[in-house]
Image (cartoon, grey):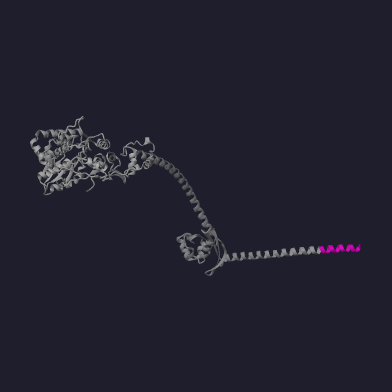
Amino acid sequence: MSQLVVVDPDKCNLSFTCIRVCPVKAIKIEDNHAKVVAERCVDCGHCVTVCAQNAISYRQEKDRVRDLIGSDKPTAAICDPSISGEFVDISDFRKFVAMIRALGFDYVLDTAFGVDLIAYKYKDLLNDFHGKYYIHTVCPPVPWFVEKFHPELVENLAPLVPPYVAMAKVVREMYGHDAQVVYITSCVAAKDDARMHKESGRVDGVITFVELREMFEENGISENFVEFSDFDPPVGRKGGLFPIRRGMLQAVDINQELLSGDIISANGKTDFLQSIEEFKRETGLKQHLDLFYCEGCAMGPGMSPGGKKFLRRSEVIHYVNKRLRGIDLVNWHEQIERFSHLDFGRKFNSQDRRMPYPAENEIRRVLNDMGKSKTEDQLGCGACGYPSCREFAVAHLQGLTNYEMCYTYTIQKLHTFISKVNAANDKLKRTKEALKESEEKARTGETHALEAAEITTAMLDKISAGVVLVDENLRVIESNRAFISMVGEDAQTINELIPGLKGAELASLVPFYRLFATVLQSGQDLLNRDTPYGESILNISVFTIKKQKVVGGIIRDLTSPDVRKEEVINRAREVIKENLETVQQIAFLLGESASKTEKILTSIIDAQKLGSKEEEG
């Protein structure tokens, strides 16, 4: 069975209106849209009617009904008594009966007779009072709500089928057990409730009055093209008042005066919820509950939108009065007697869908997270769909809500976010200004760098020795013309495509690349290393520019005339320098020896002079 109420994610604008009207909070926000939790839903259908975006819809059964009409079995339409409140635009009820027949139904009956039958059963139940108070079950959302959320009250549910099921039993008793039954109603919940009944109480399809109007339009059916047609028997009496508060009680003349009455009638969500809560908790209540979730069936979610409550109520009363004037009471009593033996009993079972109530410390934690630690901040605005912040916190811990559903929390976060965005914008503005200034400096620096690079390249090209700079991967960073000429024609060809051989592998250019690798690894310079290269002898000096990152090399061809002349001069200078140093060292030693000799000779002369004087005396 497909889910009764569903949400179109593309249409949902997260207004939370659906959550506010849901009596059991069977709607949660998931993936940025509302989602109906089917196992908790009581099928009231009011979320459908309040969604301004038409994002929520109930299961359509028009195709199923068309298949039933088109089958070879007789098909009967049983109409909810609120039909008179729906078709206020049709001049005579016999016209909408004829229009329904025009769709292909073999029989069209008024469920008011089923109301009459069930009303008598309720009268018998209440008259046979043994101290047990009952909750009426003629409105399908009522037993769903009790079974799921007040399972301790299941035994208080009146064990009787709703009127439309009683009418289905009557149809099969009167028109054959193979007859197919379609219920036309204002109640969306009947679509699921109908599938709970089997055998003679089976209802094969359920369409709302909205779907009925769509079928009229699709088939081009209007009151102008049909003749008068009355309902097929059996006809109802005061059961036509069923859509109005206390209507079913009046069907069997149950008079509920204030002083003597023992039945509380409650319509609408607020009274519905409160009456059940008090029925469960207040031992002094001591009254039966005649409940309808809607403000009467004439205001059910299956009615056309925009209808006026009191106008519809007036139309229902007018319709019943008109029917009563022409009713054959003798025949009606006979029909009541004829079908009163049918089994209208029903059983209910607990389907507890209540969630575990969270611990108090967890509730306080959520409230603190939402910025609602103070009691005065927990009263709640109701925008999220929950009556108080505390109930919202409980639902959050049960997985039904998220913090973003709370408007005050979201607004606070929004203000914080806006402050952060403003601060970020200010910072971005300053950053842009700094970046602009940096770009200007960078452009200036780039210009200077290009100029410096051009100057460096020009200076390198003026040097007669080969110069090459390489990185840690032994790839050329820069080289001059002398180096390129020294390496050979292949290097000169590459230089035409890549000036300075930038990026070339040194190992592919010269065989002495290992000298560069050694300096990169050790960090120790290698100076004046002679190595043969082809028919030449190269003098190579490799030195560190950036430790273990960049090294440079100066290569001289010793066989070149200019270098050879320079080298001879340099080496002659070195020989002269070395000879001078030797001569200077010899001179120093000779000078030191002469000085010592002089001192010794002087000492001897002085001693001889002193001896001669002593002899003369």
Name the residue at 25% across, 39% down. 50
Does 101 sit left or right of 491 as displayed? Answer: left
Picture quarter containing residue 570? bottom right
Quarter of the picture containing the C terminus is: bottom right
Residue 320 spot, x, y in % from top left: 13, 34
Q: Residue at x 11, y 34 (%)?
A: 324
Q: What segment is highlighted magenta in the picture?
A: 603-617
Which quarter of the picture shows residue 20? Answer: top left
Residue farthest bottom in this picture: 535
Asked whether the viewer can see residue 328, the reply is: no
Numbered-mark total: 0
User: For residue 57, what is the image quadrant?
Assistant: top left
Residue 548 at least partly seen: yes
Image coordinates of residue 578 in percent, x first then y, are: 66, 65
Left or right: 560 as drawn, with respect to 208: right
User: Residue 369: percent from the left, percent from the top?
Assistant: 38, 41
Q: Residue at x 33, y 41 (%)?
A: 394
Depth check: 212 or 149 in front? 149
Q: Who is closer to the viewer here, 377 or 588? A: 377
For the view shown, which residue lies furthest in the top direction?
259
The verdict on residue 609 being magenta is yes
Q: Which residue is at the far front?
A: 130
- Residue 184, percent from left and from top: 16, 42
Our reading of the magenta stretch's main secondary structure is helix
508 with respect to 130 (left or right): right
Pick the residue in front: 468 or 268. Answer: 268
Q: Is residue 539 magenta?
A: no
